Image (cartoon, grey):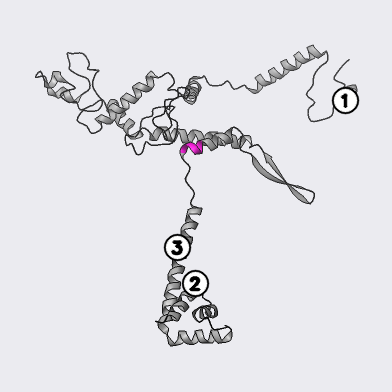
Amino acid sequence: MKTSHQTFILEMVKHGDKELAWQKANPGNKGGNSARKAADRLLRRHPEMAAEIEEAVATIRHQAYKEAYRLYTEEQRTPLLSMMQRREILARIARGEVKVCRYVKNGDRYIMLFEDPRPRDMMQAMQIDAKFEEACNRMRNFNDPVLSQFNIYIDGRPCDDPAAPVNTDLPPGIVMLPRKAKKILQEPSASGSVELSPAACPDCFGSGGDPACAGTGVGHSHRTQNTSLDPVSPHSPLYHTYLNILEKRKLAEEDILHATWYSQHKRAEAEAPPPHIYTDEEIAEMDRALAKERSRTLGQPQYSTFGKMYFPEKDTRCNL
């Protein structure tokens, strides 16, 4: 391949203009229509040159497409919000720090107004934040360390920085039992039959006692009731989970801040007596007593004249 042909191919790959590429390959040519015809004739006579130019251009175009698509995907990629970032946004909405933009028409133009969020929006933000906290408190009871990694304040320490000191100003989350484990723990006590191990009942297995009493939670007929029995057998696969739950429950009960305001409110609401519902006669008696008190304080009788105009000088019921 001649040097002029190589120069022509290189220039065609650069910009794709046949006239400029022919002038670069043949400096003595002035260009114009003759240069374009000569370039077409060269490509017809040497199809391998045209194939090489087309292949190089296709490769460059494909690489450009890949790079553009990569840049586009990086620009469009939005990082997911962590749980703490979501709660921070909800807290700003609940405090009224996030303004709401609204456009109001004023004459022949629109005015942009920034207003505080409505009370309904603030209350909804509080409800969503409470649901997030409750869900995370439940999920953190799992023994799997992968499932328990949540970006939320539970014991006053953020999960983003486990080495941070515990913040005593924030109350820790309630230690909740998983539903399945709670059901398993409640079933033996409800049914009254718990399978005991030799370690749990040494009087039956170790001292030659009657092993028939091992399947009951009552104990021996002529002895005291055994109250130190574990609901879950030590040989059960749930025994370690049961010990972990007991430890969490003990730590929660020893902490004076383990009960949140909501649990205290629900407990007080359940213990409160039912409200007294007044009858129609009691309401009428209260209205009469109120009207009598107003008449005594104002010096004139009071009548229920709501919904219509009242003229004292035309009132025949009042003898003034």
Residue type marked 2: Lys
Q: In terms of depth relative to the viewer, which is nearer, 287 or 148? A: 148
Secondary element type, mark 3:
helix
Of callouts 1 and 3, the N-terminal one:
3
Q: Main secondary structure of the magenta part?
A: helix
Q: Which residue is mark 3?
A: 66
Contact between marks 3 and 2 (CB within 8 A): the answer is no
Q: Which residues are magenta?
A: 83-87
Q: In terms of depth relative to the viewer, which is nearer, 276 or 93? A: 93
Q: CA distance from mark 1 to mark 2?
A: 99 Å
Task: Residue at 46%, 77% (x, y): give it.
Answer: 7
Q: In terms of depth relative to the viewer, which is nearer, 235 or 169? A: 169
Contact between marks 1 and 2 (CB within 8 A): the answer is no
How many other residues sit within 10 Å of disc 2, few (<14), some (14-19) or many (≥20)? few
Q: Residue furthest right?
A: 313
Secondary element type, mark 1:
loop
Q: Is residue 101 above or below residue 77?
A: above
Q: Which residue is mark 2?
A: 14
Q: In terms of depth relative to the viewer, which is nearer, 166 or 241? A: 166
Give left or right: position of 241 versus 25.
Answer: left
Q: Which residue is mark 1?
A: 311
Residue type marked 3: Lys
Give left or right: position of 195 versus 37.
Answer: left
Of callouts 3 and 2, the N-terminal one:
2
Residue 187 in view (yes/no):
no
Q: Position of residue 118 (x, y in %)?
A: 64, 36
